[in-house]
Image (cartoon, coloured by chain):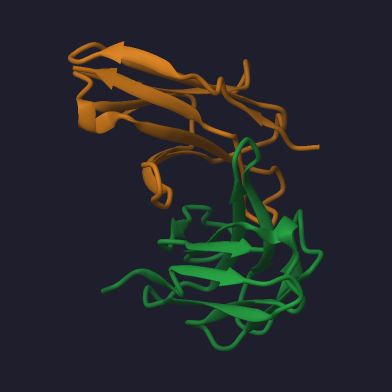
Chain colours: A green, B orange
Amino acid sequence: NAGVTQTPKFQVLKTGQSMTLQCAQDMNHNSMYWYRQDPGMGLRLIYYSASEGTTDKGEVPNGYNVSRLNKREFSLRLESAAPSQTSVYFCASTIDSFAYEQYFGPGTRLTVT
Amino acid sequence: QKEVEQNSGPLSVPEGAIASLNCTYSDRGSQSFFWYRQYSGKSPELIMSIYSNGDKEDGRFTAQLNKASQYVSLLIRDSQPSDSATYLCAVNESGGGADGLTFGKGTHLIIQP
């Protein structure tokens, strides 16, 4: 039981490049989330998926897109990376959107130059 | 706007003493409260959840909730150097919003051997 997994662990992009961050969970959770964490800013919600087939914007969605591929997988895409998107990205999941106990993946450290 | 406030610290506590971490929240209708521990360079790890007024104990950890005063605290007894980490307080919004939790920015705890 791996819990929540994320790939890649580290990534360096040039401004304007695109990439997709992958997240998968094996806990049969319905709800999944993408956060970014910046020094002094705490965790900020980018997008979430309350259940398979639905996605919604969080606090800071600009510059990102998401896909809930199936119940297990939730990906985050940066179409044209900007230096302001340099951050640590965490994926999290919970059994359903009203349970609230979220479990986090190990994170992706992204640098945009 | 939902707000969760924590003193950023650092909070320095001698080994073996009680560490007391505090959190206040703005949404009076919040129902669920969580403490996460985050080691440097790692992802947040859920350590305590509390849903009703009073104390909840789990090993060396005690969570305390006072909804009338809108604060939640975490006590760590017999503090160990391995407890040195950043502790995040998280709160759900009232109404059971599917976007999940609002996180504080965290308190940096240092346990001095």
Q: Residue at x 37, y 73 (%)?
A: A27
- Asked whether, in this view, residue A93 is left or right of residue B27, the answer is left
Residue B17 lies in what quarter of the image? top left
**Quarter containing the C terminus of chain A:** bottom right
Q: How many marks?
A: 0
Residue A29, percent from left and from top: 46, 72
Q: Residue furthest bottom?
A: A69
| Looking at the image, residue B18 lies above or below residue B33 | above
Q: Residue at x 36, y 14 (%)?
A: B12
Q: Is residue B98 visible?
A: no
Q: Residue at x 34, y 22 (%)?
A: B110
| Looking at the image, residue A69 lies above or below residue B68 | below
Near-viewer residue (B94 or A33): A33
Residue A39, percent from left and from top: 59, 40
Q: Is residue B96 visible?
A: yes
Q: Residue at x 70, y 43 (%)?
A: B94
| Looking at the image, residue A11 lies above or below residue B106 | below
Residue A103 lies in what quarter of the image? bottom left
Residue B30, percent from left and from top: 64, 37
Residue B90 lies in what quarter of the image? top right
- Asked whether, in this view, residue B64 is left or right of residue B70, the answer is left
Residue B25, percent from left and from top: 65, 28
| Looking at the image, residue B96 lies above or below residue B48 | below
Near-viewer residue (A102 or A80): A80
Near-viewer residue (A34 or A97): A34
**Quarter containing the N terminus of chain A:** bottom left
- Asked whether, in this view, residue A83 is left or right of residue B57, the answer is right
